[in-house]
Structures are given as C-alpha cells and as structure tokens.
Amino acid sequence: MKQITHIQHVVLFFLALAVLSCKGTIATTTDVLSSLNPDESLAEVFEIQLKATVNHNDEFRIYYTAKGTTEFSENQVIRVKIVGLSEEQTIIYKFPLGIYPSNLRFDFGLNSNQQTTGINAMIFIDGQQKKVIDGKNLLEYFSILYGTGKFDKNAKQLQRLNEQGLSPIIIAKKKLIKQIFHNQKDQTQNVNQS
C-alpha cells in the first residue's frame, strides 16, 4: 500500500475545494436564475430616458426626493456623463433599486459652453408602465428655476441664461408627480415589506 504524501494531500485538498466551489456556484446561479420573475424584477426598477441633443461634453444630473425627504440633496442625485453629439442621443437615468421619487429636479449641465440643449422627449419607465412626454410639452410638466434658463417649445430647446455656470434647472410640477408617481406610496410599501 502506498502512503499519500503531504504534497498529494495539498493537491487533493485544492482539487476538492475547486470541485465544491464550482458545484456551489453553478447551483447558486441556477437557483437565482430559476427564481427570477421578469415582471417582478422590472417592477422594482424606475428609470428616466431623456431624448436630447447635447452638443458638448457635459454632466447632467437628476436630484430626487423619496419617501421621508422633502429637500433635494447631494445624497439623492444621479449623475450622467455625456459625450457631445450633434444628433439626438438617449440619456438614461436609472434609480437605485426600490426608489420611486416623490419629486424631481433636472440640472442640464455644468459646461458653460452648453448654451442650448434640445429636449425631444422624456420617457418615464416604471416596470411595464411607460409615460412619454414630448419635448414641446415640457413646460406642462416642469417649471424652469427662475434665472437659469428659458424654453423654446417650437424648437424644443432649453437655453442657458446664466453665464456664471449655473445650469438650466427644471423642477417637476404636481401634474407630473400625480401622473407618473401616483402609485409611489404603494410601491415603496411593497419594497419595504419584502
């Protein structure tokens, strides 16, 4: 009978560990994939797509309030870096899992060379539900913060007014909150219960 050497013990140990690790990973991945319900996973994600023409590299931000907060803050912001293009692009803001905003504020850029931003549409996606706002109707759903910009609805362009670098800022009106976020309270409760 041959004795197993110390080196063979070490090799067997790592071989066994590799087999067990692979087995566990495969089983875990299979369990996760089989337990996913696409309708449930989509219902937990809220996103906004902005169809816009942004000529210069920039950073756009959405500040939001959620249940229990009323003030916009740096703790509740989504930043998106943008590469300037002369044609329309889709800018996607994905909210943290389970977050359904109770109010929104869009800041349109830090780049003072960005004099205008074409806003063709905003699309609000909440699971399987979708609400599209045509750019020409922007002022029905948002107010422009005084002194930061003006909107030409025929050209669908938001223009910067402040030369000191303050970006055009729009804040959601109650009409938008009621139409888009009417079920926010129920969804937040469902997330908290699970």
Image (cartoon, rainbow, N blue to C red):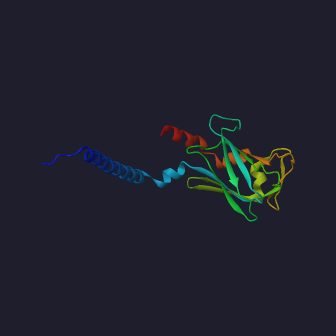
Give whichever of 123, 173 is nearer the camera: 123
Residue at position x 56%, y 49% in the image = 45
Q: x, y percentage for residue 46?
A: 60, 49
Give whichever of 175, 28 is nearer the camera: 28
Left or right placement of residue 89 versus residue 145 in this view: left
Residue at position x 65%, y 49% in the image = 180
* Quarter-of-image position of residue 97: top right
Count of labels in the image = 0
Left or right placement of residue 131 versus residue 135 in this view: left
Q: x, y percentage for residue 124?
A: 64, 53
Q: Residue furthest top?
A: 68
Q: x, y percentage for residue 192?
A: 52, 38
Q: Residue furthest bottom?
A: 87
Q: Is residue 105 above or below residue 117?
A: above
Left or right placement of residue 29 versus residue 39 in this view: left
Give whichever of 55, 173 is nearer the camera: 55
Q: x, y percentage for residue 81?
A: 69, 52
